[in-house]
């Protein structure tokens, strides 16, 4: 794993510390959930207070300007591990959290976007009133793979009338070229594989 996207203040020391934490606390699980896949297990990171705190703050930096001022109104997290990271990022920024869920999981009126997966299709939904028109939104997820989920989430934000500000992810799987799917959306990734 390599770290990406250093912040301006104390970048070297902060990045080395974050790099060390991620190297120690994100473990590879071979052949899960199927043969040939190396799953990035973040549960040891989530169980470590210092590691989780450092990651939340680093992800939240994408919702601040260079002077540290919050520039977003909401944080959106994608089901399921994105929820775990996005909710504390929203708290760190002092803004609301909005879940993006699989189809049929949210009560009330929703916007929906379907997108292609490697073997099939998926649909994501958000509450229609979760994001007000004009609100600036930070998208947060654990992993950027092919970019399908991130792009579908961006479309949901736009259907609500929101303005996607940036995408902030813990791990980018560079070999899957997810950046291409979200090319014009600013991307902050804490580490690249």
Image (cartoon, grey):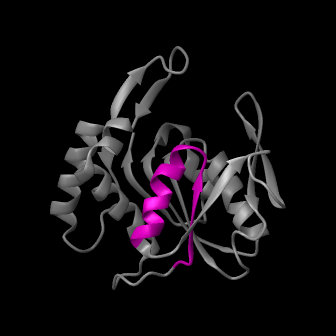
* Residue that protrudes farthest toward the front in the picture: 107
Magenta residues, start to end: 72-92
Residue 50 shown left or right of residue 163 in the figure: left
Quarter of the image where the C terminus is located = top left
Q: Is residue 62 visible?
A: yes
Say which quarter of the image contains residue 188. bottom left
Q: Quadrant of the N terminus?
A: top left
| Residue 55 position within the rendered picture, expressed as x and y whole percent measured from the top left | 33, 55
Provide residue 77's location: percent of width, then percent of height: 57, 56
Q: Closest to the observer: 97 or 114?
A: 97
Quadrant of the rendered image containing residue 177: top right
Q: Quadrant of residue 2?
A: top left
| Residue 1 visible to an observer of this rendering | no
Give the residue furthest to the left.
13
Name the outermost residue toward the right.
109
Q: Residue at x 36, y 48 (%)?
A: 191
Q: Position of residue 18 (x, y in %)?
A: 24, 53
What is the tally of numbered marks visible in this picture?
Answer: 0
- Residue 72, x across and y down, in percent: 53, 78
At 70% from the left edge and 68% from the top edge, which residue is drawn?
130
| 33 displayed left or right of 29 | right
Residue at 18%, 54% in the rendered image: 16
177 or 24: nearer the eye?
Answer: 24
The structure residue drawn at horizontal position 54% and vertical position 21%, both measured from the top left corner, is 33
- Residue 95 in the image: above or below residue 25: below
Q: Is residue 86 magenta?
A: yes
Q: Is residue 23 left or right of residue 124?
A: left
């Amino acid at each position: 794993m390599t770290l990406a996207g250093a912040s301006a203040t104390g970048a070297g020391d902060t990045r080395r510390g974050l790099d060390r934490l991620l190297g120690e606390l994100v473990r590879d699980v071979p052949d899960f959930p199927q043969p040939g896949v190396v799953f990035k297990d973040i549960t040891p990171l989530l169980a470590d207070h210092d590691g989780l705190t450092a990651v939340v703050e680093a992800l939240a930096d994408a919702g601040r300007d260079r002077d540290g001022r919050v520039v977003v109104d909401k944080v959106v997290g994608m089901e399921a591990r994105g929820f775990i990271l996005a909710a504390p990022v929203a708290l760190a920024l002092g803004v609301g959290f909005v879940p993006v869920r699989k189809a049929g999981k949210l009560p009330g009126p929703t916007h929906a976007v379907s997108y292609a997966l490697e073997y099939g299709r998926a649909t994501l939904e958000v509450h229609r009133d979760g994001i007000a028109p004009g609100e600036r939104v930070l998208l947060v997820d654990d992993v950027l793979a092919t970019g399908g989920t991130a792009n579908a989430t961006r479309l949901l934000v736009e259907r609500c009338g929101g303005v996607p500000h940036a995408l902030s992810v813990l791990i980018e799987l560079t070999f899957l070229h997810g950046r291409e799917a979200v090319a014009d959306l600013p991307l902050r990734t804490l580490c690249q594989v």
